[in-house]
C-alpha cells in the first residue's frame, strides 16, 4: 500500500488515520457490539471523521520527483 515514493509524514498520517477510523468504526453503535461505554459511542462519529481527514491530508505529502 505504501511504497518508497511516499515520505515519512505521509506514512504517519495515513497509518494514524487508518487506526483512528477503524477504532471509530468499531465502537459505532451500528456494529452491534454491546457493553461499550457511552462516551466511546458518542465519540465514534468524530473519530471516523478525524480518520478520514487524516487520510485525505496524507495525499498532500508526496516526494518530489528527482530531476
Image: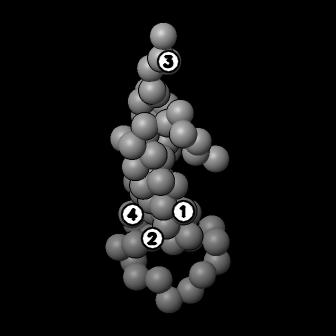
Gap between marks 4 and 1, in whole Å? 13 Å
Q: Earlier in the sequence, mark 4 or mark 1?
A: 1
Residue 16 drawn above or below residue 34: above
In terms of sequence position, does the residue under pointer 2 or pointer 3 come before the other?
2
Which residue sits at x=56%, y=86%? 34
Residue 39 occupies which quadrant of the picture?
bottom left
- Which dot marks residue 22? 1
Mark 1, secondary structure of its residue: helix
Identify the mark nearer the N-term, 1 or 3. Answer: 1
Instruction: Tell me, yes or no, whether the two marked residues, 4 and 2, touch with CB atoms within 8 Å.
Output: yes
**Depth check, front residue: 27 or 29:** 27
Where residue 13 appears, as percent x and y from the top left, is 41, 46
- Looking at the image, residue 66 lies above or below residue 58: above
Mark 1 is surrounded, within 10 Å at the Cα level, by few (under 14), some (14 to 19) or many (20 or more) other residues, namely some
Where in the figure is residue 64, as x and y percent of width and height? Answer: 44, 20
* Badge 4 vs badge 1, beta-carbon distance below 8 Å: no
3D distance between C-alphas at marks 1 and 3:
32 Å
Where is residue 18? Give x, y as percent: 52, 55
Q: Secondary structure at mark 4?
A: loop
Q: CA distance from mark 2 to mark 3?
A: 43 Å
Name the N-terminal-most of marks 3 and 4: 4
Spatial distance from mark 1 to mark 2, Cα to Cα? 13 Å
Q: For the residues labelled 2 and 3, say whether their Cβ atoms are less than 8 Å apart.
A: no
Within 10 angstroms of label 4, few (less than 14), some, or many (20 or more) residues? few
Q: Which residue is mark 4?
A: 43
Q: Which residue is mark 2?
A: 41
Mark nearest the camera among 4 and 1 is: 1
Amino acid at each position: 500500500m505504501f511504497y518508497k515514493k511516499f515520505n515519512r509524514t505521509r506514512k504517519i498520517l495515513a497509518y494514524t488515520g487508518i487506526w483512528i477510523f477503524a477504532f471509530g468504526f468499531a465502537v459505532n453503535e451500528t456494529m452491534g457490539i454491546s457493553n461499550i461505554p457511552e462516551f466511546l459511542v458518542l465519540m465514534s462519529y468524530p473519530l471516523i471523521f478525524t480518520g478520514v481527514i487524516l487520510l485525505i491530508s496524507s495525499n498532500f505529502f508526496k516526494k518530489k520527483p528527482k530531476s
